[in-house]
Image (tube, coloured by chain):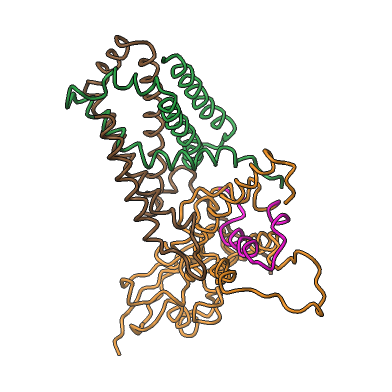
Amino acid sequence: MSRKPYIREVPKTSWFFRQPRYMRYMAREVTCIFIGAYALLLVVAVKRLAQGPDAFQGFLDALHSPLGVLFNLAVLVAAVYHSTSWFNVTPQAMPIQRGEEFVPGKMIVGAHYAAWAVVSLIVLIWGV
Amino acid sequence: MSERQIQLEVLRYNPETDTEPRFQTYSVPCLNEWVVLDALNYVKDNLDTTLSYRWSCHMAVCGSCGMMINGEPKLACKAFIHEYPDKIRVEPLANFPIERDLVTVVEDFITKFASIKPYLIPKEDKPISAGEYKQSPAELLKYKQYTLCINCMLCYAACPQYGLVPEFLGPAAISMAHRYNQDSRDGGRDQRQEVIASHEGVWECSFVGACSEVCPKHVDPAGALQQVKVASTIDWYKEHLMPWVKK
Amino acid sequence: MAKSNKPIVWGLFAAGGTVTAFVTPALALITLFAAMRFSPGMFTYEHLHAFAANWLGKLIIFGVIMLSLWHAAHRLRVTVHDFGVRSDLVVATIVYMIAAIGTVSAIFSLLSIR
């Protein structure tokens, strides 16, 4: 009896189309492109801030454009998806044991959402 | 008792005669209470004795009957016919080489599982006369979930990183290392870290989470792996920033 | 099998992921409003300059920017690998270089705000 195992190749670029859970994973992962682009925007913003009121106004003017609006909208959507996906898995990554029980995952997640609301409010009040 | 005629589309492969796998369809009269394993057994008993597949307990505790059922890694004994349409596609577990029909080559998993030292390594040698190890319920809870693994390898089939990077240790092996690391009786974490904190160890994981979704025993290997990452990161900083601290 | 040095970047990735999860949506909303000129009193030079002139403000701005950059860089490295690009060393060098340049730029900008 001879063995001849057959290896099924996994397509390196299109594997994630095979299952909805893989698509959701990739959607979560590509939010980093928007988070990263936004971080670079903030780098530029701080640079213009340092260069003085005229330079900063130039930055604001460049932001006020269809591209600027679309970009920020895309970042907002991506950021929210990142936040929700991040908070939802926190209990898995950092379970909290209190004596002979684990703190229910829902509580940990809920606490994160509550903190998110508070922090968002603070940031919005500061910025506005 | 209600019956349904199910078309079972099974991926066949005979290493002695075939160059590649092919589908073969069997028409099986299934009772609504049946699981896919019952349908396979019907095929083997009545239609085609050459069909090869692994199974044993028929109650989701032995981990033998893992296979892809309509593209999803499942235990055949836990895939209820009433949850499926009239056509069911059955394939061997993904990410493993096919030995024959639905039987996969599991040597890679066995080797990786053994490499993480899945046994208690006591902190110090204790003679029998010193008495038993005592463990509180709280200490037990720290690792109990990870003892439930039945080595069914569904998590390896679900893990895209294992599919793309075959060197990856994988969810079950690393979770089992975590099980022992978390056990208060164990002192072998340093030895296991050499294996699981490597590139092919936990760092190949990108927290897709598919492993935990398919696990039939709710072990949550994804959670275990993230906890290993956190612990390994704290370790790394301790080792490199405070090398004078003895572990 | 040698122990990996991934913990360095993973720690930054995890910290950055947490920070961005909490603050980026609100920040993006602010810049969206600024882009839409939703209200003229927002995101003004004076307000931001005053915040950045303060050392705590500098620290917060630096923390948010730096962690966002390194979080995105590491995740992008993994994502590019997921898309089938196997030259991990090249990708890693590129993404971490960009993050480093952004970090240094932010430091210089913040230090020059008095």
Q: Where is residue A123 drawn, in percent x and y?
A: 31, 35
Q: Is residue A63 above or below residue C30?
A: above
Q: Where is residue B68 drawn, in percent x and y?
A: 46, 65
The one of B106 and B173 positioned closer to us in this rendering? B173
Q: Where is residue A51 drawn, in percent x and y?
A: 38, 11
Residue B227 sits inside the magenta stretch: no
Chain rendered brown: A
Name of the residue lying farthest toward the bottom: B1
Q: In this view, does B193 lie to the left or right of C85?
A: right
The number of discs equals: 0
- Could you tell me which residue is drawn at 64 percent across and 66 percent down? B183
Quadrant location of the C terminus of chain C?
top left
- Could you tell me which residue is drawn at 29 percent across and 17 percent down? C45
- Could you tell me which residue is drawn at 47 percent across and 57 percent down? A92
Q: In this view, does B136 lie above or below A81?
A: below
Chain rendered orange: B
The one of B125 and B59 positioned closer to us in this rendering? B125
Q: In this view, does A64 lie above or below A1?
A: above
Region of the chain picked out in magenta, as a range: B165-194
- Could you tell me which residue is drawn at 34 percent across and 70 percent down? B87
Residue C26 quadrant: top left
Q: In this view, does B221 lie above or below B61?
A: above
Q: Is residue A15 left or right of residue B200?
A: left
Chain rendered green: C
Q: Where is residue A56 drawn, in percent x and y?
A: 31, 14
